[in-house]
Every structure is written in C-alpha cells, then in structure tokens.
Image (cartoon, helix red, strand yellow):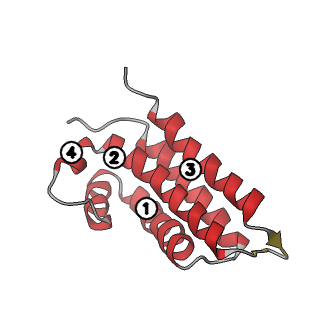
Amino acid sequence: MEKDIKKEALRYVENAKEILSQKAGKEDGFYKDKKYVRMAGNTLWNGVLEALNYRYPLIKTSKGRPDINKYKELVEGDNKKILNHLLTGYNYMHLLMGYDGDLSFETSRTAINEALILINWATEHKQAA
C-alpha cells in the first residue's frame, strides 16, 4: 500500500516548524541560531522534494541526482504559475535558510508558506508514469 505522501511531506513542514520554535530561539523578529535555521530550511525543502518526486516519479529514474533544473523543467511544462512558487520556495528554503541560515522570521514564514503551496499542488494528482 502506497504511503500517504501528502501526510508524509506535511510531516516535514511540522518538523521544521518545531525546530524553529523549540531550538532556533526567536527574538525581535529574528532567530538566534543559524544551525537550526539551516536544519529547518533543509527539512522544508526535503518535504517539498518528497511531494515533487511523488508527482514526477520518472525524475528518480533518470541518471544522476535530480537538480533544480529538472524540477523547473517539469513544473514549467505542467503549471507555469506553480513554477514561480517553486523558484521562490527553492530560494527561501534551500538557499536562504538551508545554506545561508538567514535569521529573519519573515524568511522562514515565506519558506513555510511556499512549502505548503508546493506540497498541496504536487500531491493533488500524480503524473502518469
């Protein structure tokens, strides 16, 4: 039986929120600890990847690791409006939070919102294999 991918992907979002609220230490609109911001950003992005890999099962069968360009190409062919969310989500979750450890609460709030949009969209209908 196939696991409920939406539930699984949303679990990543909840884990990221928990990391931020319990470990990153928020003060005056900023987090105090980059380590936990990075961890939360990577957790969010992994949840989105779970959902995208579900929607596009063939992406995992291609050679090499999937990179953002493969996802961009697939999403653009499917829904150009969602492509903007993918690009924004990638920037906020993976780059600003995951790599840079951006301490702004607004950055993490945007990242969480984009993750939810992408997960909900990607888990609506699985693309034919």
Find the distance from the CA under tag 2 to the CA under tag 1.
13 Å
Placement of 4 over or under 86, stated as above or below? above
Q: Find the residue positioned furthest to the top.
A: 1
Foreground mark, 1 or 4, reads 4
Q: Residue at 46% x, 29% y: name it.
A: 4
* C-beta proximity under 8 Å, tags 2 and 1: no
Tell me the tag on residue 58: 4
Amino acid tagged 3: Leu
Q: Position of residue 3 (x, y in %)?
A: 43, 28
> What separation in Å lies between label 1 and label 3 (alpha carbons)?
11 Å
Q: Mark 1 vs mark 4: which is more N-terminal?
A: 4
Locate residue 73, reporting x and y percent.
Answer: 25, 61
Q: Residues within 10 Å of mark 3 (few under 14, many from 20)?
A: some
Identify which residue is drawn at 33% across, 36% down: 126
Residues under numbered marks 1 and 4 in contact, where contact means CB atoms less than 8 Å apart: no
Where residue 123 appears, x then y in whole percent? 43, 39
Residue under label 2, please give it: 53
Q: Quadrant of the C terminus?
A: top left
Mark nearer the viewer, 2 or 1:
2
Q: Is residue 77 left or right of residue 34?
A: left
Discs 1, 3 touching: Cβ within 8 Å: no
In the rendered image, which residue does mark 3 sit on? 116
Q: For residue 86, which numbered disc appears in the image?
A: 1
Q: Residues within 10 Å of mark 4 (few under 14, many from 20)?
A: few
As helix, strand or loop, the secondary structure at mark 1 comes to: helix
Helix, strand or loop at disc 4? helix
